[in-house]
Image (tube, helix red, strand yellow):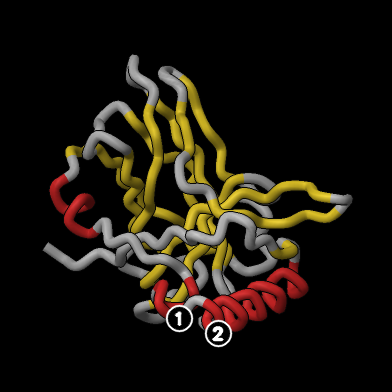
């Protein structure tokens, strides 16, 4: 079985930074630099690492959970790329998303964009509830996945695999389209 990158959840929930365009990326890199200086014991780039690889390997695949319109906004390798998708929970039970992984990137983080004092900022999200018979959208300006440190070279037009891990040792799998940095939607 191929090795999946493990999900990384940031422990510093108060760490927020601007979300949009190059300003976001500059602040994101600055945040990582500061976190690395102050929290080196927490793991790479200041994030507290939780290794979910064994959970992903043994998790039961949920046949009634669909990951639709999955796409990645591809940025240069030194910048984090963003991912978007819709989780469609067709089961009769609510689900709790706790991590994401892909063999295409070493680190995957779950984030949410929020408004604070008139500015868009990002914060880490440890759990995301998906209601029974409901959907949750990961989209620009809201919930999204951040992908860091590519394990190879991705190109626009290619696809990448993604796994989403839920509480209770369950997972859903998807194939995501790689779109250009200027893309704003799946199509």
Residue occupying image coordinates x 61% and y 49%:
112
- Give residue 91's position: percent from left, percent from top: 33, 20
Element type at marker 2?
helix
Compared across the picture, whether 62 is left or right of 14 comes to left
For the residue pair 31 and 149, the one nearer the viewer reads as 31
Residue 49 horizontal/vertical position (percent): 37, 65
Label 1 Cα neighbours within 10 Å, binned few <14 / some 14-19 / many ≥20 = some
**Residue named by callout 2:** 37
Can residue 71 be seen here? no
Does residue 3 sit above or below 96 in this rendering? below
Picture coordinates of residue 138 (x, y %)? Answer: 56, 44
Q: Which residue is mark 1?
A: 40
* Most foreground residue, 47 or 41: 41
- Marks 2/1: CA distance? 6 Å
- Is residue 66 something that shows in the picture? yes
Q: Is residue 44 above or below residue 184?
A: below
Q: Quadrant of the N terminus?
A: bottom left
């Amino acid at each position: 079985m191929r090795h999946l990158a493990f999900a990384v959840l940031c422990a510093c929930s108060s760490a927020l930074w601007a979300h949009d365009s190059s300003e976001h990326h500059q602040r994101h890199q600055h945040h990582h630099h500061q976190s690395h200086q102050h929290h080196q014991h927490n793991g790479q780039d200041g994030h507290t690492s939780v290794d979910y690889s064994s959970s992903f390997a043994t998790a039961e695949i949920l046949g009634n959970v669909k990951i639709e319109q999955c796409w990645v906004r591809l940025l240069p390798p030194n910048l984090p790329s963003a991912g978007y998708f819709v989780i469609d929970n067709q089961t009769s039970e609510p689900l709790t998303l706790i991590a994401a992984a892909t063999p295409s990137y070493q680190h995957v983080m779950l984030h949410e964009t929020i408004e604070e004092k008139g500015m868009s900022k990002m914060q880490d999200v440890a759990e995301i509830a998906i209601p029974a018979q409901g959907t949750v959208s990961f989209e620009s300006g809201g919930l999204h996945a951040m992908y860091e440190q590519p394990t190879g070279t991705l190109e626009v037009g290619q696809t990448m695999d993604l796994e989403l891990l839920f509480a209770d040792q369950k997972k859903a799998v998807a194939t995501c389209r790689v779109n250009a940095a200027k893309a704003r939607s799946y199509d």
